[in-house]
Amino acid sequence: MAHPQYLPIAPELFAHACDTVSTRVSQLPFLRGGVQVTGELVGVVMECLNAEPTRALALSTPKGVDSSVARGLDLILEERLDLSGKTVVPVITEVLCSAGITEMTEIADRQIRKTRRAVHLLSPWTWHIASTMAPSVRLGGTGADTGASLSWLDTCPICRTGILERVTGKQLFGIPHTDFIIECSHCGAKFIPVGPAFRLVSIAKIRDPLWKRYLDKTNTPEIWATIARGPGSGTIQSSSRSSAPQPGVSTTKPAGHELARQVLAPASVTVTALQDGSLAIPLPGKNLYFRPIPLKFTGGAKEDTFTRIQKPLEEVLQEPAFEHLRDPVNAKYSRYLPMKTGLFLGHLKERFDPFYRAFLNPYGDEKFGSFRAGDSKETEKRGVVIVAVNRGLYHVADSAEPLYLTINNYFGRIGPDDCLLFGDPARCRVNALLSNNQTEAGLFFYSSEREADRLTLVQAVDKLIRPNA
């Protein structure tokens, strides 16, 4: 028997299916019966069912079957997704039936002369090569007029999976009052209206590069729609300037909370790389040459470092940095006060509750790695250190102690408490830059034993990084 041709599911229908499962069953992705239920699994099962003339498939393939007998959904999923069909099929069919996307049925198999249990894709969820979404399925823009075009509400520009929907009666912490917000059904991205445009103010999955690129940007619906349908590496001009400052900090331990939310924003200056790997930094009247410092990485970058915080939530809230969070926590999360703070924040993140980010510094939710200084005579000296990615400058700091100590004890490792508001955003940012861009990023050093000279040089380089600061 020839294998069916799988017609890819329409993006809008796929988004609505994921939204429906998340609403009626559980927020995707989730674990059910030892099976990880994901949007991909939902979409593939729907494609398999839609490819059949009857829109139905037997749940299992009989033992000892030959190619003349129709395969079951279990064998098809094993071929398409390389997983255990016998384990997955009972779970995914129960989920889709609970969501109202499929129904259980029986099909008569003439080859083996038996009736086989099967799953059937309901007609509102089927599609063909020339089909468009039925009105009952196209949720974006239904109901009250949002003032935005369907083209941008159909697909979230952040996750490109969920549907954007108008939500009334809900206010965001720290955001001025608005009559309504626009929220993604999948990733939790939230937009507020600004005149005829919309501003991205919150998202649950903050490591998505689009979060760093478009946070606090205000765009028209047409531009957001272009972002949603454009390539992941594309850049779109915003209709207003972001409130985030330029990247870079001037000292190793800056005073106060840095407002920048971008770890790898476009560098404001690009420098020249020499054949020996050094960087030529253009300063008034001269060039200074910063030598590359080898780093030895241990393992890969790991996420969710903050989930290892051991202090109880009620103890952490006593810190002055969290005074503004005590009332919101007592009002909504009081039952979690005895819980370890790391477990509490991890629980919020798993539920796509963006409130967990209120406890973290701007870079506290990045992926962090471990590294040490490599073999170099320069590491025994004091001086000024810079971080560059693809010859773009991102950070400058004074190494008042031998460089190997600054690298090994400071930049090279991040502890759970470093991720909190009272932690060190500069330390987190540099570690994330170097750990997540090992082939493109580098640490460079200029030796200088006099403190006054180092501080003057730090200020001069910082002006290159942040010319408008």
Image (cartoon, grey):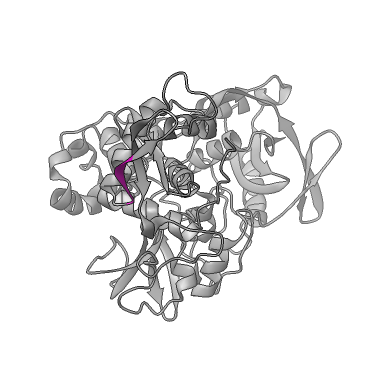
Q: Nearer the viewer, residue 387 or 181?
A: 181
Quadrant for residue 232, please give it: bottom right
Between 147 and 391, the residue placed more toward the observer is 147
Residue 186 in view, yes or no:
no
Above or below residue 296? Residue 176 is below
Residue 160 visible in the displayed image: yes
Residue at image location 33% in from the left, 39% down from the top:
93
Q: Is residue 104 magenta?
A: yes
Task: Look at the image and give the residue range highlighted in magenta.
Answer: 101-106
- Tell me, yes or no, whether the highlighted magenta stretch contains residue 346: no
Q: Quadrant of the C terminus?
A: bottom right
Which one is in front, 344 or 250?
Answer: 344
Residue 248 falls left or right of residue 31: right
Q: Give the dominant element type of the magenta stretch: helix, strand or loop.
A: strand
Determine whether 244 is above or below 135 in the image.
above
The image position of residue 108, as x and y in percent, is 36, 38
From the top left corner, tell me how far across and down residue 380 is, in percent.
66, 23
Q: Is residue 124 above or below residue 92?
A: below
Q: Which image quadrant for residue 112?
A: top left
Q: Position of residue 398 (x, y in %)?
A: 59, 39
